Image (spheres, grey):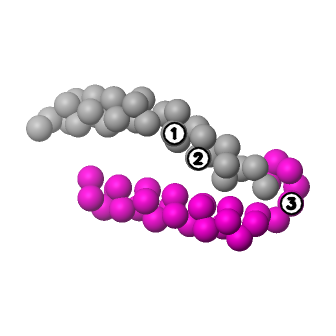
Amino acid sequence: MNYVSIAVSAVEVLAQAAPSIIDDIRKILAPIKEGREPTAEEWDAAQAELDAAEQSVING
């Protein structure tokens, strides 16, 4: 597979995931925007998102 094919596939996947990604970003930024410490649930959710993103990169 050439670079252009890989790039097009990556952009298509990101475009399909965009609504979910935006929602996740909003959740992660909420405590910062509200000027408060994150709750335990927010910490756990942020860590889970980070772990999932890392696995996605590792697994390609």
* Residue at x 26%, y 53% (from the top left corner): 60
48 lies left or right of 41: left
Helix, strand or loop under label 1: helix
Q: Which residue is mark 2?
A: 24
37 lies left or right of 22: right
Q: Residue 31 appears in which quarter of the rendering?
A: bottom right
Mark 1–mark 3 Cα distance, whole angstroms, equals 24 Å
56 lies left or right of 60: right
* Residue at x 28%, y 29% (from the top left corner): 8
Query: Of 37 and 10, which appears nearest the observer?
Result: 37
Q: Main secondary structure of the magenta part?
A: helix
Which numbered disc, 1 or 3, marks the residue that appears first in the sequence?
Answer: 1
Q: Residue furthest front?
A: 41
Helix, strand or loop under label 2: helix
Q: Which residue is mark 3?
A: 36
Expressed as whole percent of the image width and height from the top left, the position of residue 43 reads: 66, 67
Mark 1–mark 2 Cα distance, whole angstroms, equals 6 Å
Query: Of 5 and 54, which appears nearest the observer?
Result: 54
Q: Residue furthest left?
A: 1
Type of residue at label 3? Arg
Q: Which region of the structure is painted magenta? A: 32-60
Identify the disc placed on residue 58: none
Disc 1 crowd rating (10 Å Cα; few below 14, some 14-19, many 20+) is few
Where 15 falls versus 32 (above or below)?
above
Helix, strand or loop under label 3: loop
Q: Which residue is mark 1?
A: 20
Which numbered disc, 2 or 3, marks the residue that appears first in the sequence?
Answer: 2
Expressed as whole percent of the image width and height from the top left, the position of residue 23 reads: 60, 40
Type of residue at label 2? Asp
Q: Do the residues under discs 1 and 3 have CB atoms within 8 angstroms?
A: no
Q: Do the residues under discs 1 and 2 have CB atoms within 8 angstroms?
A: yes
* Residue at x 58%, y 38% (from the top left corner): 22
